[in-house]
Image (cartoon, rainbow, N blue to C red):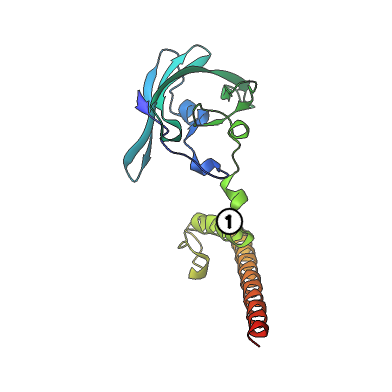
Amino acid sequence: MGGFNSGNHGGKRTTSDMRALDVRRLERDGLLSPGQSFLWSWTREGETVASINVKVNAGYVTLDYRNRPNGGEWQAINYPVWLSYSPCHYGGQRAWWLCPAMGCRRRVAVLYGGTVFACRQCQRLAYASQREAPHDRAARRADTLRKRLGWEAGILNGEGYKPKGMHWKTFDRLKASHNAYVNNSLVEMMSKFGFAMRRLEAIDRAADKLIR
């Protein structure tokens, strides 16, 4: 069995802090046929940091791994996660997990690892974007557009050229959206910087009064 969780997470966690098991990825890779068994791993900088054994049965998969909650002793974990299927608009069907947490059974695409794999609500996770400051969110969205346009990442790096083969109408639309996000990010940053400066000035004035 692969080792899984050996850390102690403090504070409010986000989805990016956790190991995600995405049923869409397994389905896309052809790994949900009954009778298959495979090792699913997570890597960081080319190194495996966690893994689980997955056995596919008719209507459910079995997860088999070791867990060490709060840095304690390693525990062997083995339990089923049931699958649900919904029809697609253009034929075929789409797989979902049924959250295995006690009393849940939500139909979700992604489970997040802890002592057991469970949905975001059961793990009480926020999305990483919910922690972003407004200027960071706007900059991230601008960078998403820069990637699509083939421009260098970073909103301070200026504009690039129209990608070869892209229609001018599409380019102009993406560029306008990009510039709007950049402007929002810069305005928010200046507003935050101005608030910080005013606060420091107020502290300085208060300190001067105490000295006098």
Establish if 104 lies above or below 71: above
Q: In the rendered image, is residue 10 in sight?
A: yes
Q: Residue at x 58, y 30 (%)?
A: 119
The quadrant where residue 66 appears: top left
Any part of residue 158 in sight: no
Name the foreground residue: 113 vs 84.
Answer: 113
Q: Quadrant of the C terminus?
A: bottom right
Q: How many other residues sit within 10 Å of disc 1, few (<14), some (14-19) or many (≥20)?
A: some
Please determine whether, in this image, residue 119 is positioned above or below residue 130: above
> In the displayed structure, does residue 13 sit left or right of residue 208?
left
Name which residue type carries label 1: Arg
- Residue toward you, 75 or 37: 75
Residue 86 horizontal/vertical position (percent): 62, 22
Q: Residue furthest left?
A: 47
- Residue pictured at 38% horizontal, 18% vertical: 37
- Most foreground residue, 43 or 67: 67
Residue 197 spot, x, y in % from top left: 62, 76
Q: Check disc 1 and report the residue beneath it.
A: 141
Residue at the image position 60 percent from the left and 66 percent from the top: 182
Quarter of the N terminus within the rendering: top left
Q: Nearer the viewer, residue 96 or 19?
A: 19
- Tag count in the figure? 1
Q: Position of residue 210 (x, y in %)?
A: 66, 82
Residue 93, horizontal then vertical, whole percent = 58, 22
Please name the residue shown 51% across and 27% down the image.
Answer: 117
Q: Secondary structure at mark 1?
A: helix
Residue 46 drawn above or below residue 25 = below
Q: Is residue 20 above or below residue 1?
A: below
